[in-house]
Amino acid sequence: MVATDKFKKTPETATFNLSAYLKERQQLCETALDQAIPIVYPEKIYEAMRYSLLAGGKRVRPILCLATCEMTGGTIEMAMPTACALEMIHTMSLIHDDLPAMDNDDYRRGKLTNHKVYGEDIAILAGDGLLAYAFEFVATQTPQNVPRDRVLQVVARLGRALGAAGLVGGQVVDLECEGKLDTSLETLNFIHNHKTAALLEACVVCGGILTGVSPEDLQRLTRYAQNIGLAFQIVDDILDITATQEQLGKTAGKDLKAQKVTYPSLWGIEESRSKAQQLVEAACAELEPFGELAQPLKAIAHFITSRNH
Ligand code: GRG
């Protein structure tokens, strides 16, 4: 059954309070993440993992997963272990991205980066620990009312989003392109479709896998996520130019310094904003068949282009 049959389309009359929604969901995620990793021996590694995992952050990825699961008929409980795993994976990618061998950054989420506090050796291991635990967490904590073959699909999907076909591949090309001001739009799209959009896509798609959506709906969700993924990165590039270190919680102006080609460097800021807006509208159009239930995901898509941090 596809979304058109399953969800009755109703006019979007009620105004949706996104900031209240995000605040509530962020709080749920904070509590679940805090409980997910207790400190045991050897304490140092658990402290390092928790330091970055609980350092704040918008929690866009887990919230997308929860919202998709709910939109397609599931519950928060069904998706919370996957949502936490997605945030663990995202956090580990930030820890490794900030290392001297990669982007070499001193600040993240308004705090000193993991390696600045714990040293490079422990930061690498904290990232590795989070990555491994993410998979264990999905496999062992997803409630039994979710069929095991769906859990297996989620695990496979996460693995694909992270490896050389996803984040890792995008990061490799990004590193190769540093200092190359003749990087093409095609290469730039490759970098961000893999480095940023692949994980956002996994968040949405995994939310749908957990409820067993139809292949057609999965396609819709994928297109929604790919569009918001690229819009997210365009806005990230704009903010690197226009926002302050305080707003970003990390060093501003890094792309220019690293001589990286970005969307604003190719299109200018205004054109980049308008492209991001078009992508968000295309993303929302994919959700029409889900009717009013799609309000949170649509509002999150708009938040992506209007955010200032
Ligand atoms: C995944 C195995 C594995 C290794 C990591 C380092 C690396 C490979 C990839 C880099 C991925 C990366 C850092 C992409 C940037 C994504 C991005 C736009 C991050 C900012 O996300 P926000 O704004 O941050 O959601 P908060 O702090 O709010 O969560």
Image (cartoon, grey):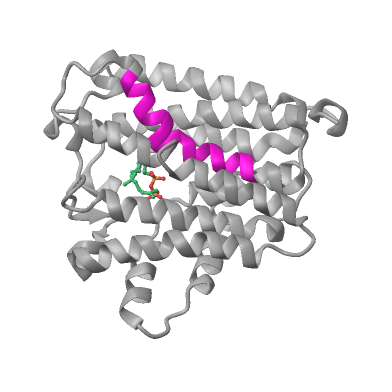
Place residue 171 in its image quadrant.
Answer: top left
The answer to whether residue 170 is above or below residue 103 is above
- The stretch in magenta equals 187-206
Residue at 61% of width from left, 30% of height from top? 222
Quarter of the picture containing the C terminus is top left
Q: Tell me if residue 33 is in the magenta stretch.
A: no
Q: Quadrant of ligand 1?
A: top left
Which of the pair 138/242 is nearer the observer? 138
Q: Is 301 left or right of 217, judged from the image as shown? A: left
Residue at 46% of width from left, 34% of height from top? 197
Place residue 162 in its image quadrant.
Answer: top left
Residue at 52% of width from left, 31% of height from top? 302
Q: Is 88 left or right of 300, judged from the image as shown? A: left
Q: Is 28 left or right of 303, judged from the image as shown? A: right
> Residue 202: x percent and y percent?
55, 41
Q: Tell me if residue 197 is in the magenta stretch.
A: yes
> Residue 35: x percent and y percent?
53, 74
The answer to whether residue 174 is above or below residue 244 is above
Residue at 40% of width from left, 39% of height from top? 164
The answer to whether residue 179 is above or below residue 123 is above
